[in-house]
Amino acid sequence: MQAEYDGRQIVGIDLHRRRSVLVRMTETGERLGSTRIDNDAMTLMAEIAKAGEHPQVVLEATYGWYWAVDVLQEIGAEVHLAHPLGVKGFAYRRVKNDLRDAADLADLLRMGRLPEGWIAPPAVRELRELVRHRAKLVAWRSGLKASVHAVLAKQGLHLQGELFGVAGRQLLKKAPLDAAYRLRVNALLRLIDAVDFEIQAVSGPLRAALAGDPGFAAVQQVPGVGPVLAAIFVAEIGDVHRFASAAHLTSWAGLTPRHRESDTVVRRGPITKQGSTLVRWAAVEAAHGAGHAGWLSEKRAAIADRRGRNVATVAVARKLLTLVYYGLRDGHIRALAPVRAAA
């Protein structure tokens, strides 16, 4: 069959950290071959070459998929990225192995039922790497600062004010701590300084990458959104035109309520919390930072009276992300433009 078939081939890849399984099949689902390879660019190229010119290749958006997609696109394959949530049902089969996983991906692709993810171009992936690295560093710094407060609490000390500025460092230096606790606080402060240095080091390239980006400037018009949150929105959302509407973006970010319906039974629950965790966090942070910005304050208060403070915050975050959508799409946000005085 393999020698006789000269049509376009479908290739499913079950990608792992060290090794991967490839399954080739026809457009009608007949198996042409399968193999297991060590993860290497040249080896992958050689195996895909057996599928002829411009094969359709599908792999899951799993650990370290960037290199494989780049290699496949370089040799002319039509690459499809399977969304992990969409193929999660494979885990409940009675028989699950790498060969079956690769074959199922290929079957979904050829039948037109593949839940696809967006393949971000290299430039967007690099921008995301900078944004995510900075976010991780800030999270580490927050953990270190929390540890300092925890050590002080063990000694019954509750120092007032900002402890990590110039004046705060003097307070920490003079704090009456026993030897073991002093050693730990000093170590934590040195680690905080080191992380501060790394945050500054990544902030420079991040600013350079976003300089002149119209979307980056536009979304900072949104209440509560500064340069840091704007960078997260630009990097994580990427090409905003892949979303048909602002509602699609808020759904992708996991800020829309769950909906379960069967016959006459309808259940609506809390937000899905699927999609980009960083975008969702940034939208909620913007909602907290928006403060008492006119109409937002009224909207938050009205919802809080009916549904509670947390639901109101999420509703405001969803509205702010809607504004971010239009800022990235159009380069400006008409809803926030000053009203022209009547002539």
Image (cartoon, rainbow, N blue to C red):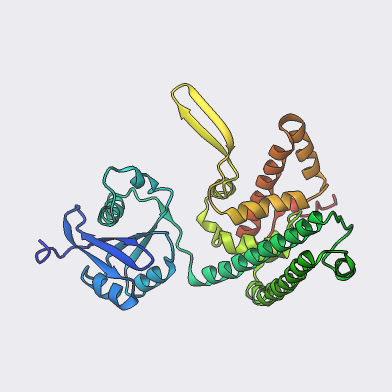
Q: Quadrant of the N terminus?
A: bottom left
Count of marks placed on residues: 0
Q: Nearer the viewer, residue 169 or 307?
A: 169
- Name the residue: 67% across, 75% down: 198
Q: Residue at x 82, y 57 (%)?
A: 155
- Judge from the rendering whether residue 315 lies leftward or rightward of residue 262; answer left or right: right
Left or right, residue 191 beside residue 261: right
Asked whether 192 or 122 is in front, the reply is 192
Residue furthest to the front: 179
- For the point 73% across and 60% down, the residue is 147
Of the pair 6 and 261, the residue shown nearer to us:
261
Residue at figure coordinates x 33%, y 75% from the top left: 40
**Image spot of residue 20 (x, y percent):** 31, 65
Horizontal side, residue 162 vs residue 185: left or right = right
Rendering coords of residue 101 (x, y %): 30, 53
In this view, 121 is above or below 316:
below
Residue 157 falls in image quadrant: bottom right
Where, by quadrant of the figure, is residue 300 drawn?
top right
Q: Is residue 7 visible?
A: yes
Place residue 258 in its image quadrant: top right
Q: Vertically, is 169 above or below 14?
A: below
Residue 218 appearing in the image: no
Question: Which percent across, then down, holds residue 231?
Answer: 65, 65
**Residue nearest the observer in this picture, 137 or 208:** 137
Residue 194, image x and y in percent? 70, 75
